[in-house]
Image: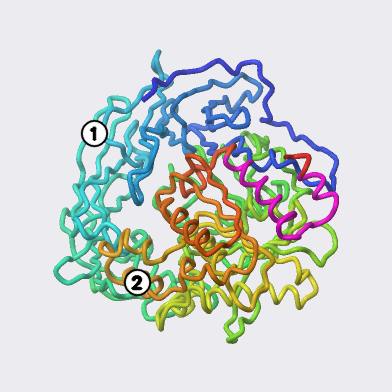
């Protein structure tokens, strides 16, 4: 690992930051691809407890690694302190512990190739900044840990956890409790005190703001049940509150003690209903007391905390729910009023979030994001609002595309939702169908999403269909993808095609200019699309694709249990397999894969390419050197290569040219 240091190497450079809003002329011409390929210029703005300082991570140049900058909240023109970690890479996320102390994480590439499924090439390190020291930067020489919470009433102390051994056979279970040990850590003295050592029966422990354990999740290997325990205030006793068999698809998740009723907990649960709701649960009598919030259309999201986690650390301010976008339902009227006020003063306010607040409540870091805002940070101090920076300040609100929420009927009558990113200009547009990965995840396109925005900026309408199996629409919708047999490559695929045909019927899309692009499961779906008999696509781009479901399952089929096993085995053991469909491919295809993909290892690509070659199928291939499966391993050189190849393929091989100005701009960028 490299030595960390305070760096002055960037002094005197012109920065795109603090109080400066750059306005340029609105133009119909697409941005150069360079603008899209750059990683976020600024991330993770974090405020000190007294509000006197804030820190952020910044990338100073295209292709560069992040540094940390520390600013004086009362003098934004003052040169910031800069922290560099080269050749280690600083990761987003800065945890202030005291007014002059914060923690951050760094990673370093330690091998050239992955070591198998889910075994990446990075090692991670906790790092401390202590402004009171003459040498303020130092690695924390103990096991890599996770910061669970600050302890606001215990100066210089935080709650950390370290993951310990996982029994063989339980690693990938949906109900697996991965034991962690919990410690009170003094960041000044670099000492720690054990609070609780987790075990399978009590694997994940939750604490209040004073570091007192309140409840825990466990697993009973004798009965194959998830178990939930609570600790009455002032005792050391663990009492059982609930059990849920691992084969159940329902959820039960205690969030925190119910502040209104003794011995009750706020719990996210189905409790026999299709949609997830927030309940008050009587732990003493092991029964649901009352539903506090539940919807009939979508699941209730996770409760959110009070904006001041230093003075009101245990307070729940409300719950979220996501459909067309994410919405808040406030329980705290003062918090609701504060957010309404912020939405009135933040430019282009949409998803406004208080990401940091001083203990006295008077200084705030506010972040705003939307489909047309990649993320913008503001400092509010002494009644003054100052813009700190945008995540991607060179992408302007007026130049980005709107996102619409739509619903349509699939061919079997099931209602499907989707998000449509709409390019500037008049249709009908060429369309790129972009299914999400997973497949069993939740997606809400209410924040900036780089891939569809890049495509829309180059003239393509983008549909992100929420096909059956997508989560947040209730248990029945989720289970409809597999519970009566696998719909992977069947009805799940129809849902995507039917969304494209819906937009064609509306006159918004040219039926002769439709493509599919996906990553991971989305890449699998693109390969399936390439071989469909009732073909509606002119081409496909398959990224990090599962080409052989049987091979993918073999990586972990003997390590999954319960509902996860039912879901995965039912889905993939009977899925339509792309590698068995190569002789049916009837459109041009571009296949993209990282050669260090730990989630869908490169042997998927190699095996599929061999099958294509044997079948005499034409294709184009792009291997991203040293890229893993995940977006945080796609660096500038990966993304610029990917975007150049995508646009060239869509325009030249597929005939999906948007318009002449788009093609000219894309060619200039190349």
Q: Compared to 215, does 8 lie above or below? A: above
Q: Indicate which disc residue 192 carries.
A: 1
Residue at 25% across / 44% down in the picture? 182
As helix, strand or loop, the secondary structure at mark 1 comes to strand
Q: Quadrant of residue 263?
A: bottom left
Q: Position of residue 634 (x, y in %)?
A: 53, 42
Report crowding for label 1: few under 14, some 14 to 19, many 20 or more residues within 10 A (C-alpha): some
**Residue 384 among magenta residues:** no
Residue 319 visible within the image: no
Q: Position of residue 331 (x, y in %)?
A: 50, 62
- Image quarter hosting the N terminus: top left
The residue closer to the viewer here, 315 or 97, is 97
- Magenta region: 638-666
Residue at 77% across / 34% down in the picture? 22
Q: Position of residue 2 (x, y in %)?
A: 39, 22
Q: Earlier in the sequence, mark 1 or mark 2?
A: 1
Residue 382 visible within the image: yes
């Amino acid at each position: 690992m490299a030595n960390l240091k305070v760096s002055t190497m960037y002094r005197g450079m012109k920065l795109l930051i603090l109080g400066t809003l750059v306005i340029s002329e609105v133009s119909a011409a697409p941005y150069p691809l360079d603008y899209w390929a750059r990683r976020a210029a600024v991330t993770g703005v974090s405020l000190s407890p007294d509000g006197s300082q804030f820190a952020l991570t910044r990338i100073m140049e295209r292709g560069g690694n992040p540094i940390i900058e520390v600013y004086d909240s009362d003098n934004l023109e003052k040169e910031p302190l800069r922290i560099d970690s080269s050749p280690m890479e600083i990761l987003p996320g800065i945890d202030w512990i005291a007014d002059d102390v914060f923690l951050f994480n760094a990673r370093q590439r330690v091998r050239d190739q992955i070591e198998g499924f889910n075994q990446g090439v990075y090692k991670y390190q906790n790092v401390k900044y202590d402004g009171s020291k003459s040498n303020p930067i130092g690695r924390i020489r103990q096991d890599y840990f996770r910061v669970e919470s600050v302890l606001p009433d215990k100066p210089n102390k935080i709650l950390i956890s370290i993951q310990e051994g996982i029994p063989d056979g339980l690693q990938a279970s949906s109900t697996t409790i991965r034991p962690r040990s919990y410690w009170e850590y003094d960041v000044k003295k670099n000492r720690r005190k054990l609070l609780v050592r987790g075990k399978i029966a009590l694997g994940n422990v939750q604490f209040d703001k004073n570091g007192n354990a309140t409840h825990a999740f466990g697993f009973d290997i004798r009965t194959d049940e998830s178990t939930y325990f609570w600790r009455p205030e002032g005792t050391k006793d663990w009492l059982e509150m609930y059990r849920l068999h691992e084969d159940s698809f329902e959820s039960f998740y205690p969030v925190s003690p119910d502040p209104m009723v003794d011995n009750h907990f706020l719990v996210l649960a189905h409790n026999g209903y299709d949609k997830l709701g927030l309940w008050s649960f009587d732990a003493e009598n092991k029964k649901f007391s009352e539903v506090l919030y539940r919807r009939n259309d979508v699941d209730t999201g996770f409760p959110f905390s009070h904006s001041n986690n230093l003075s009101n650390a245990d307070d729940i301010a409300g719950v979220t729910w996501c459909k067309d976008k994410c919405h808040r339902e406030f329980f705290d009227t003062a918090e609701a009023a504060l957010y309404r006020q912020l939405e009135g003063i933040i430019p282009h306010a949409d998803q406004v979030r208080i990401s940091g607040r001083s203990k006295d409540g008077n200084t705030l870091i506010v972040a705003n994001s939307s489909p047309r805002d990649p993320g913008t940070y503001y400092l509010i101090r002494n009644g003054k609002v100052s813009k700190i920076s945008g995540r991607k300040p060179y992408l302007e609100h007026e130049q980005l595309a709107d996102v619409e929420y739509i619903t349509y009927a699939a061919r079997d009558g099931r209602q499907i939702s989707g998000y449509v990113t709409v390019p500037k200009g008049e249709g009908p547009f060429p369309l790129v169908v972009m299914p999400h990965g997973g497949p069993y995840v939740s997606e809400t396109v209410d924040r900036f999403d780089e891939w569809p925005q890049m495509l829309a900026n180059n003239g393509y309408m983008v549909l992100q269909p929420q096909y059956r199996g997508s989560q947040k629409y209730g248990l029945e919708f989720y289970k409809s993808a597999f519970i009566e047999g696998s719909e992977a490559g069947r009805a799940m695929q129809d849902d995507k095609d039917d969304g494209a045909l819906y937009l064609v019927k509306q006159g918004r899309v040219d039926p002769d200019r439709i493509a599919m692009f996906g990553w991971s499961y989305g890449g699998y779906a693109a390969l399936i699309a390439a071989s469909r008999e009732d073909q509606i696509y002119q081409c496909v781009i398959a990224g990090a694709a599962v080409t052989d479901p049987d091979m993918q399952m073999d990586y972990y089929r003997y390590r999954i249990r319960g509902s996860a096993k039912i879901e995965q085995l039912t889905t993939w053991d009977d899925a339509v397999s792309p590698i068995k469909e190569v002789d049916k491919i009837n459109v041009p295809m571009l296949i993209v894969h990282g050669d260090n993909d730990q989630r869908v290892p490169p042997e998927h690509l190699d095996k599929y390419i061999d099958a294509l070659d044997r079948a005499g199928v034409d294709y184009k291939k792009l291997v991203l050197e040293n890229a893993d499966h995940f977006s945080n391993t796609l660096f500038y050189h990966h993304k610029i290569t990917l975007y150049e190849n995508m646009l060239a393929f869509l325009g030249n091989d597929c005939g999906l040219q948007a318009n002449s100005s788009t093609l000219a701009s894309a060619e200039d960028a190349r």
